[in-house]
Image (tube, rainbow, N blue to C red):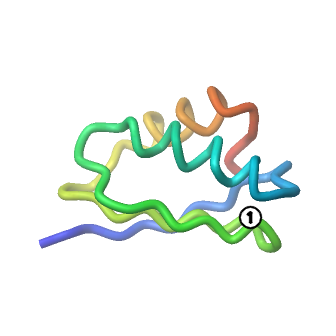
Amino acid sequence: MSETATYTVTGMTCGHCAASVTEEITGIAGVENVDVVVETGAVTVTSAQPLDEADVRAAVEEAGYQLA
């Protein structure tokens, strides 16, 4: 069964921002889907198993943004 977690990412302003965050988070092992809402900063991640928040934080920072 899939796990779903929602994070808040600050600093995203456009579709390119969302694409960058999606690309980095998708690179985490087990991630099945990433849904980004730029307007609210909500990033919902569906994965095969619970993710380590440190991995998500690192991916978001690699994209140039911060977890709230």
Q: Residue at x 67, y 61 (%)?
A: 8
Residue that numbered label 1 is attached to: 41
Of 26 and 15, nearer the camera is: 15
Can you name the residue that lies furthest to the left here?
1
Q: Is residue 51 left or right of residue 22?
A: left
Q: Residue 50 occupies which quadrant of the picture?
A: bottom left
At a point 20% along the width and 55% down the height, the residue shown is: 49
Q: Secondary structure at mark 1?
A: loop
* Quadrant into which the N terminus falls: bottom left
| Total tally of numbered discs in the picture | 1
CA neighbours of label 1 inside 10 A, class few (<14), some (14 to 19), many (20+): some
Give the left or right position of residue 46, taking residue 62 as reference: left
Q: Position of residue 45 (x, y in %)?
A: 43, 62
Camera-side residue: 27 or 53?
27
The amino acid pointed to by label 1 is: Gly
Query: Residue 14 location in percent, x, y?
Result: 83, 57
What residue appears at the point 53 percent right and 34 percent down from the top-left corner? 59
Residue 68, above or below 43: above
Return the x and y of residue 12 as percentages of the image width and height.
81, 53
Residue 43 placement, left or right of 4: right
